[in-house]
Image: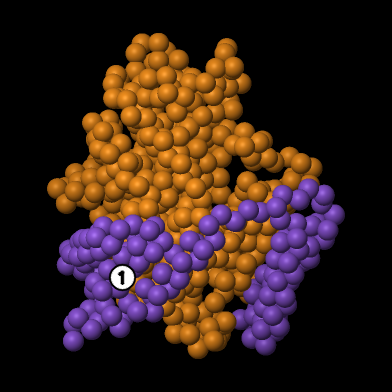
Amino acid sequence: MDALEGLLYGFSLALTLKNLAFVFAGVLLGTLVGVLPGIGPAAAISLLLPSTFHADPISSMIMLCGLYYGTMYGGSTTSILANIPGEAASIVTCFDGYQMARQGRAGPALGIAAFGSFFAGTIAVVGLMLLAPTLASVALKFGSPEYFSLMVMSMTLVTYLSQGSILKALMMAALGLILSTIGLDPVTSSLRFTYDVLVLRDGLGIVPAVMGLFGVSEVLLNVGAIMNREILQSKIKNLFPNRKDWKDSSMPIVRGSLLGFILGIIPGLGTIIPTFLSYGLEKRLSKHPEKFGTGAIEGVAAPESCNNAAATANFVPMLSLGIPANPIMAILLGALTIYGLQPGPLLITEHSDLFWGVIASMYVANVMLLILNLPLIPLWVQILKVPYAILYPLILLFCLIGSYSLNNNVGDVIIMCVFGAAGFLMRKFQYEPAPLVLALVLGPMMEDNLRQALLISGGSIATFFTRPLSAAFLLVSVASLLLPLLKMRPTARFRQQEE
Amino acid sequence: MLKADRWIGFLFALFSLYVCVESVRLGLGTYQQPGAGFVPFCAGVILGVLSLALIFSARFRRTNNAERWHNPERILMVFLAMLGFTLLLEWLGFILTAFLLIGLLLKVVERRGWGFSVGVALVVAGASYVVFDVWLSAQLPAGILGS
């Protein structure tokens, strides 16, 4: 099926009344989640996941994907109006967005964020549509050694690009690998680390673990912090940027979109780091770098476009290789497995309806978000005024319901609570949860491929180094482990900027 | 933070030792046919080495930013409320447990008035039951209300 044919087929699926309703529900909920600080896309998707078990996989994926990029749109609203990032990828938008709002230019800031996101989202979907099938056909030639090495590379890249100590990030990856081995060993059928606990027999649930690490821990952190939320009260007007705004923003939007898409493809990079890079790039290219941080519209346009493009690009490794680029993709990958689909390079050919349906729904979602977002801003402002004291009991309750309804089992709720407490302590002591989650998801696949590769090669570890592609992946892994020793880490600079 | 890092490194080192011992018990197998304990053993060794490196690096780093804990009692109460919800869910049923959770968080943790706390708890418990159980067929436990 060529791209045009596939896309037309996808639109025939995405434009049914039922799927339009699913896209609408996804983007609306996503925007709400993006607007609300204290609940991110990972927790929200985990929360919604059990409710999709009754729907068909295409509609469910359409809704969950819509929710993901809805959060990218929504996150900017809180950054601009309250100086609090609604979700992590909108941190950079606070720098200039809030300053613009203080100068009475909240309207153009929100407007350019929405238009930039629309442009970036659309461009990135075109890229995803063209790249993913090509990458999948290349990946079909991969053997177990290549897969194993690719996953090692993803994990080391995540640790390399983590914002804290690389040592701690590596520790979390190793811990995630250990935790991923809990349950029944598929080869020998022996139980590992289950201690007669029934819920552990099928392995540690990814969804309750992610809900705990990202949802519950976030709530616990916010409960402990003194939340000082100041929302600008003035009426928001002139959502349409003027001619000068467009002139200043058009190139940053294009550059942000391209940068976001390219970086978003790399497993492990997620959406946060590209936005910092995009902001830094614009500041460097600007004729007035001193204006950045004081309300420069380029400082909103570029990172907002960048995070949307990166969010869509994150789907490339997930849909074509079955490798998640970030924890959110890890949950979506888990969702595919729950729906009975096998993630990997065959997914696009064997389930072309799912792939093209989701791609077409992304175009629809982008249009919907643009139409919905700007008129609904007054509503989001009202929601933002709800005190966190009322909001967090609701978030907690939803997390508890979500984890229980996965299998109607209290065991999953306990797992979520344990990971919630662990996630809280991890963040307090600056251990990042992302490498742990990725290792937890990739662990079983890594183990499977490692054992297969060793079995086929007759126990020769050289098989990972003698096959060119596998060796190249491992070389990147080694480089990403060695570069921090030479103090060559891009995230070190972002940390300084964030501070 | 450095002192905490030393302790955390020590605990992780102990944990990795335990994982390695358990993995040997599960069976490491051979390179040709790795056993059930092979991967956890390798991961345990990696974690052990990294933990020792953390302890070592914490000894030689100079900066010491003391970690501040704000409102620890609030955090503990919220966590205990969640645990209570988990333990009581199947016995009391969803509606009662959700009502207790929301009411407790608003009244005890947030120090809101009785009327407000009970009112919000009633609305949230009822509405979430309708949305999740009735509309989304989440099959939440009925508990003592169902019998």
Q: Can you see residue A13?
A: no
Residue A456, relative to residue B72: is it above or below?
A: below
**Which residue corresponds to mark 1?**
B100
Which corner quadrant of the image does residue B23 belong to? bottom right
State the quadrant of the C terminus of chain A.
Answer: top right
- The structure residue drawn at horizontal position 69% and vertical position 70%, both measured from the top left corner, is B12
List the single residue furthest toward the right: B60
Name the residue rendered at 82%, 49% in the picture.
B62
The colour scheme used here is by chain
Instruction: Left or right? Give the position of A338 relative to A93.
Output: left
Q: Is residue A427 above or below residue A195?
A: above
Q: Is residue A443 left or right of residue B39?
A: left
Q: Which residue is found at the position 45% from the left and 15% from the top?
A: A248
Asked which secondary structure carries label 1, the reply is helix
A439 versus A88 height, above or below: below
Q: Quadrant of residue A106?
A: top left
Q: Position of residue A167 (x, y in %)?
A: 71, 56
Q: Would residue B39 appear left or right of A76 to someone viewing this image?
A: right
Question: Where is residue A452 shown, x and y percent of the image?
Answer: 59, 71
State which chain is coloured orange.
A
Identify the residue shown where x is 54% and y is 49%.
Answer: A267
Q: Is residue A281 above or below residue B51?
A: above
Q: Position of residue A435 (x, y in %)?
A: 59, 57
Is A499 on the left-hand or right-hand side of A213?
right
Residue type, label 1: Leu
Residue with the most extreme left position: A17
Within 10 angstroms of label 1, few (less than 14), some, or many (20 or more) residues?
many
Q: Colour of chain B?
A: purple
Residue B127: image location, x then y, percent = 20, 61
Does any portion of residue B127 appear in the rendered image? yes
**Which is nearer the eye, A492 or A439?**
A492
Chain letter for the residue marked with disc 1 in the picture: B
